Image (spheres, rainbow, N blue to C red):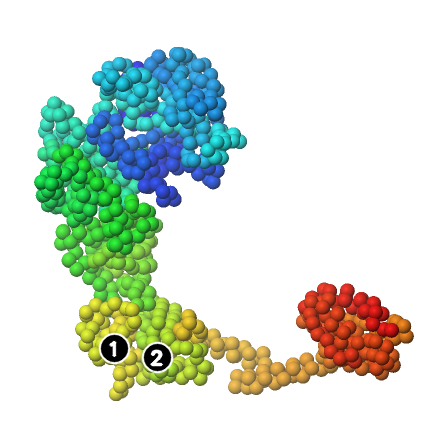
Amino acid sequence: MKAALTGNQIRKSFIEFFKERGHTFVPSSSLVPGGDATLLFTNAGMVQFKDVFLGTDQRPYTRAVNSQKCMRVAGKHNDLDDVGRDDWHHTFFEMLGNWSFGDYYKKEAISWAWELLTEQWGIDRSKLWVTVFKDEKGEIPTDEEAAGIWREQPGLVKEQVLYFGRKDNFWEMAETGPCGPCSEIHIDRGPDFCDRKDDPQHVCQVNGSCQRYLEIWNNVFIQYNRLDENNLAPLAATHVDTGMGFERIVSVLQNTNSNYQTDLLKPLIDKVQGLTGMSDAEVFENYTAYRVIADHARAATFLIADGVVPGNMGRNYICRMIIRRAARFAGKIGLNEPFMAQIGAVVIDNYGEAYPELVKNKATILNNITREEERFQKTLDAGLVYLNELFAELENSNEKLLDGQKVFDLYATHGLPFELTRDIAREQGYQVDESGFKQAMETHRVASGAGKTFGLMGGDDVDVYRNAFEDLKEHKLLPDSGVNYNPYQTREIKSPVLGLFKDGIFVDQVFEGDAVEVLLPETNFYIESGGQVSDSGWIEADDQSWTIKVDDVRRPAAGMIVHLGRVEKGTVKAGQLSVAKVDLARRKAIMRNHTATHLLHAELRKVLGEHARQAGSLVAPDRLRFDFTHPEGLTPQELDLIEDGVNQKILMNYPLHKEEKKLSQAVEEGAMALFGEKYAEDVRTVQIFDDQNLLSYELCGGTHVDETADIGTFIITSEGSAAAGIRRIEAITGMQAYQVIRNRAKIVKQLSALLSAPPENIIEKVDGLRHELETEHKEIAKIKKEAAAAAFESQLSDVQDINGVMVFSKIVPDADNDVLRSLTDKFREKYETGVIVVASVIQGKPLIVAAASETAIQRGAHAGNLVRTLAQMVGGGGGGRPALAQAGGKDAEQLPAAMEKVPQLLDEMIK
Ligand SMILES: [Zn+2]
Ligand SMILES: [Zn+2]
């Protein structure tokens, strides 16, 4: 073996080796899987390429190489129980892989793997064993192709190619979908490494589950698509997916007997040893604690870099749990003060080049770790006292199983995560009821309104804000009551930036272009409520070195208010002095609409009656929308009365009285409270008086103008139905109203020019024009009728003689009922013994009129019967007397065919 490479060199040489062979380096995806709600954490290199294999995603490359960050700490792949107890299991680990998406296949994959291991890394060829697939059920073909390629590799011992079945050597993504045989490479580290020598059941061989034969690399050859349990179809394109556990290959190449002795984790152990001052021998006596701390500190560092901070639920819970678990083990080796940030710093130094996100988020990572340790210390002692009481109870009742609900209470009240309680219980010889714990946690989640979206382990970013609030309170940066909120004055507020949140993490700085949430100790930005929308505005550096445009404001947790915006200029750091400015023009427009809403409400009740009560409201800068209970549409007169009434009150310039009062007092005084709204004991009231009377009195937390004339003008833009029994009025005020008036005046001016009439005569003029138009329409209709009659007359001789009865039938375009009837008169004037059938299509529907002369009737003709038969053919009905009848139908397309039947029908009637 060559001189040992460092872990970083090994990772780099793997990537370089495949880059030289045409692979694109694809950076590790986040530990938080994007777009996959079924997965708590990324747990394999495959995760970010899954959609490529499923054919739902395409990449600009067909060969890829990567080193993927993985976590296995919950769910199906859960190694946590083993972490710390042995030298090989981790919560966080890296997975190296090379990938072919329909490009190269077994030949290249196998010979490159062999070349990298034996030539590049110098592993002794005789120590390597490989396995290929042979189906124990004999249903899927044996992978002789791979076996043959292996036997051709230089220096490979041919007897060390072994066959294994489905469990070890067949890979499937799911019950259906891509799958295929795999081929593993194992290394024989020599008999000394066998850790199961004392086990009589143990057979020391490949896949014998001991530390002598280690699987170091799995090559998956995806060549089938599983259709169902019994059917595999070959894939048109075959793929290669390989995975090599990074910690394991490093321990092999560095020839250590523990992953914790590699240069990936040893520096962390050393750092902890430096803090405890223990001798090497003492370290090994307490090796579990050292391993847990090293593993968990590394995992927490990577988690926080990917935005997973300590919290109460989901991924955040995992981050909290591993920091607390490490802190408890630290207590066992005498580390009772926060120290883990120092271990995190070693992780960042060691891994920062391969994973730049660690360096970029260094301050955030270290702060979060330390704060979590501090929070845990505050609760740990009380938690342990309570836990010991529980153990005593079990002891007394001679039981061994700790109740799940009590384990949950320990977590909810004393911050002891389930996994810690389980650790401690095991140390004392007790078990914990895990399903009972999960049930209690789920019940609590649902009860607290956290929802079930992500199942038991769902994410919850409220924790971030709650934690930040706790810390700020503790450092006296925020009072217990939280951020001071006063939207009723709009002066600029100068204060330090207390906190910055980006993508749900508490961060120290944000850069130009970043979306950010800014926490200030005090704010006058209004937070959307009672229908009034949030304020927007700006937060700027006191020295104007940076600017954040604020678009929204929200209250993410009790006591916390954040301004949502984007950095327009510069770099913003927590602690810097800032000036917050509400967008005043916008705010004033909102205030005009809010006060106008109160006036509208009062006016509606005056005009329509006391039943007209608020049922919904929107107060925006450009309009107001007001829903109220009223059974029917408003008449134009009512709308005029209401609009006039509101404008009168505006012009009278009544002052507004805004006061805080006790709810009971306000209600007693007649304030309008909304149905279904919850009010605090102290409420804000808004009153408007005219010279003697109270016009409007509402409980309202919104912002209002000082005097009604500030509203400007009030115009109703629409009135309609919002729901059964609820009407909706939309209206505008201020500048919006002015613009509408101005635009309408412009239109009147243009109309006046077009019509050559002064504005006051426009209506008269348009009315005249409409009359003229109507007269002309009538004239045209008359002319059309005359033309049809004239055309008809010239065709009247076109008759058929059926047994001496003259028969005329025709479709007359553009003829209405009157025209058709007048045609039958003309016909009867001309023929003494005759039958006429005329038809037309009016607005898409056929109309048929028939008439028979007296003598024709004597011969058997019957207009009514004739029409009835014809009408049936065009999907209609009708009939009438023998002399004259008419009928309508639906199907105009059938009309010509029906009319052609006329001679035949008459032939049958006439004797
Ligand atoms: Zn063994
Ligand atoms: Zn209001």
Residue indicated by mark 2: 611
- 801 relative to 302, above or below: below
- Place of residue 327 in the rendered image (x, y in percent of width and height, measured from the top left): 16, 38
Three-letter amino acid code at disc 1?
Answer: Ala
**Quarter of the image holding residue 488?**
bottom left
- 19 relative to 467, above or below: above
* Residue 154 visible somewhere in the drawing: yes
Numbered disc in front, either 2 or 1: 2
Q: Residue at x 32, y 41 (%)?
A: 40
If the image is split into quadrants, where does the C terminus sit? bottom right
Q: Residue at x 33, y 65 (%)?
A: 533
Three-letter amino acid code at disc 2?
Answer: His
Q: Residue at x 32, y 67 (%)?
A: 532
Q: Residues within 10 Å of mark 1 (few under 14, many from 20)?
A: some
Asked whether 694 or 75 is in front, the reply is 75
Position of 9 with respect to 832 (left or right) is left
In whole angstroms, how far apart are the C-alphas of marks 2 and 1? Answer: 15 Å
- Place of residue 682 in the rendered image (x, y in percent of width and height, measured from the top left): 19, 70
- Place of residue 715 in the rendered image (x, y in percent of width and height, measured from the top left): 41, 77
Q: Residue at x 35, y 12 (%)?
A: 126
- Place of residue 437 in the rendered image (x, y in percent of width and height, measured from the top left): 22, 44
| SS at mark 1 in the image | loop
Residue indicated by mark 1: 671
- Mark 1 CB lies closer than 8 A to ligand 2: no
If the image is split into quadrants, where does the N terminus sit? top left
**Nearer the N terminus, badge 2 or badge 1?**
2
Position of 476 with respect to 262 (left or right) is left
* Residue 835 visible somewhere in the drawing: no
Position of 359 with respect to 61 (left or right) is left
| SS at mark 2 in the image | loop
**Residue 709: mark in rendering:** none
